[in-house]
Image (cartoon, rainbow, N blue to C red):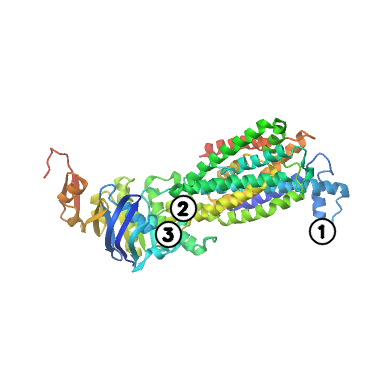
Amino acid sequence: MTSLQFSDVGVRYGQHDALSNFTDTVKPGEWLCLIGPNGAGKSSLLRSVAGLAKHSGEIRVDGSPLRMRSAKRRAQLVAYVPQSPVLPDDMTAREYVVLGRNPFVSHFGSETKHDWGIVADVLERLDLVDLAHRAVGTLSGGEKQRVVIARAIAQEAPILLLDEPTSALDIGHQQQALELVDQLRKEHGLTVVSAMHDLTLAGLYSDRLCLLHQGYRVVSGTAAEVLRQETLAEFYGVSARVHHAEDGTVVVIPYRQGSSGN
Amino acid sequence: MRRWWIPAAGALALASVLLGAMVGPAGPSWWRVPLALLDHLPLVSIDSGVTPREWTIIWDIRMPRVVLAALVGSMLSLSGASYQGVFRNPLVDPYLLGVAAGAGLGATLVFTLNRTGSSTWIIDPLPLSAFAGGLLAVLVTYVVGTAFGGQKSASTLVLAGVAVTALATAVQTFVLQRHTDVVRQVYSWILGRLSSATWGDVRLVLPYVVVSSVVLFLHRRLLDIMRVGDDEATALGASVNRVRIVVVIAATLGTSAVVAVSGLIGFVGIIVPHAVRLLAGASYRVIVPLSLLVGASFLIIADIPGRVLQNPSETPIGVVTAFLGAPFFLLLLRTKQGTR
């Protein structure tokens, strides 16, 4: 299992600081969920780990700096699922999933039997065998999301980054996708960092939440510690009640001003 | 199913070469041609009944034309497919970055400056000038496109290509207006020609086509990765900018070389890769080799009616490719949509 350390990480787009002085350590096998309003810096943080945004400070994987790595070596360590993945309509699911093997294929080489074996295995484990030869353009939203996760799993990277993995899904498929990620995390010992908007789901699945606001890390801890009525009001500007269920689940319920707010 | 496409396309290419060698206004009976070709293979001896004079027609007149058509057709199709891949735009053709307009301007200048014919030159200046014009145009496109590109270099490159094309075309039109006597020559060059093909032309373009095809062939898997967009391809460990630059240079060099000897043959670079996509799927691992083979076959076959129909004055090949290609493409599009 692999740890991920951030020391003083900043991301800047032109004159705008999207993320400032972010310091944190994601423990091996931990699921850290980044929360915060739009523009808080969640995606920037994920993109800096994936090598898509230039950053200051240092990001370390198991103690060794990520910036020293080539794009290929980085991709062997970190798999990234973007918020709206590009799925070429006419590509088959199998062709799409095998793209995840790129970090292990030499520049001008082609996939080996071993690579195709891993793809077949991932397709089977994610219940995609029947869809393997379907064009991804013909798949439903939930199936597409499974195919994208399959590509990331085929990458066999110990760190999985998920940017809003469920924002395009209905409540049933949201649950399925997150259950799948959690199951894969346990099976493969993955370290997961995700950005999510649904606070209840974020608290339900992750080990730890980290609230960002305007590029700064505000607070981090368990769902019960972070999801507090006054915190949400201050940083999201939302009127919401926070309900603590008996099993420890924290549920965030928005309410309208003027109706019952306690 | 898919594994049969490549052998089938190989067989089609071979059949096209044979057909191309068999048809023509003069020469031996068509059925003697394959025998004569076999007879000239090492270790094979067949009495084909072809006279030495007839063999000259086959080998020195028809074959260079067939081979050149194959090289031009495969290069244009392959470049078209590759450009469509790296720019993630299905409407892109091999002339996107200004090759056609630059080469057209180069050719126009030769026709206007050299109206007495090329007798005073040791080598024909037309292909050289077209090649130089094409490369220069792409170079300008590239320098301008990347200088102001920044993050969005793919789209700025295309826009720079549009600007350079407009500029070169404007200069060409201006020059043509002042020298109306060469308009006919220039337009017949623009519509493409294979009629004067010699083994010399083949030798001229062969190195470019081979190098360019090998480079593009080696990038076929990476072209699949480019399809998911720059960000995701980078996150998958691909060097997106390097792949794009190498593919663009290889495709441009090959295109400039074939345009220099054949003129601007249109439609091939769009129609062939799309026909291949509709038939055999969207993976560049299949599209790249198939475009090469189908492009070669398509241009050899498209060249045949041109030399038979209006003998002795020929129909420009660019007109034939459009005539054959456009309806075939529409039919394919319709059939394929019907089955979906």
Pointer 3 residue: A154
Query: x%, y% of residue B145?
Result: 50, 46
Residue extending farthest to the bottom is A63
Question: How many angstroms separate mark 1 from mark 2 (CA)?
Answer: 48 Å
Figure label count = 3
Give the quadrant of the C terminus of chain A. top left
User: The residue marked by circle 2 belongs to what chain?
Assistant: A
In the displayed structure, does residue A71 sit left or right of residue A26?
right
Q: Circle 3: is it few (<14), some (14-19), or many (20+) Cα within 10 Å? A: many
Residue B44, which numbered label? 1
Q: CA distance from mark 3 to mark 2?
A: 10 Å
The answer to whether mark 3 and mark 2 are in CB contact below 8 A is no
Q: Earlier in the sequence, mark 3 or mark 2?
A: 2
Same-subunit check for callouts 3 and 2: yes
Q: Residue at x 65, y 55 (%)?
A: B210
Say which amino acid is labelled 1: Val
Q: Is residue A164 above or below residue B333?
A: below
